[in-house]
Amino acid sequence: MYPRFGESLIPVKLQGLDPTQNYKIEEINLMPRRRSSLKAQGKTYSGDYLMKVGIEVFTTNKTHSRILEITAL
């Protein structure tokens, strides 16, 4: 939940992926010597999963942004 508005943070569902292909998720806009707090960081998911279930990319930190690199394996 976003503490200010009480909204639920829903997963982002991707579009246009090959459902049979696997994809690796990496956050690439990190400050030097910082680790990603993204739950999907460094993990591999099928295109089917990413399009139907999605991944949690939003954060409750209002000054935080994320840039993700999604690589087909």
Image (tube, helix red, strand yellow):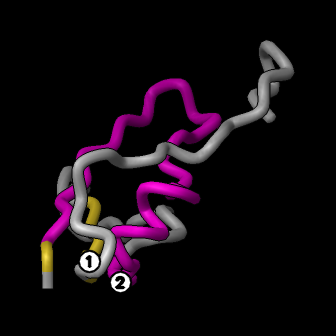
Extreme-top residue of the structure: 5
Q: What type is the residue that disc 1 sits on?
A: Lys
Identify the residue at horizontal 57%, vertical 41% (top origin): 59
State the extent of the magenta-drawn residues as a range: 42-71
Identify the residue at horizontal 43%, vertical 35% (top origin): 64
Q: Residue 13's spot in the image, x, y percent?
A: 46, 47
Q: Which label belongs to residue 24?
A: 1
Position of 6 relative to 54 (above/below) = above
Quadrant in which the C terminus appears:
bottom left
Q: Residue 23's spot in the image, x, y percent?
A: 25, 76
Position of 32 relative to 67 (above/below) = below
Q: Which label belongs to residue 66?
A: none
Identify the residue at horizontal 33%, vertical 81% (top origin): 42
Tell me, yes or no, whether the two marked residues, 2 and 1, touch with CB atoms within 8 Å: yes
Identify the residue at horizontal 32%, vertical 70% (top origin): 19
Q: Which residue carries the number 2 mark?
A: 44
On whether residue 15 falls in the magenta region, the answer is no
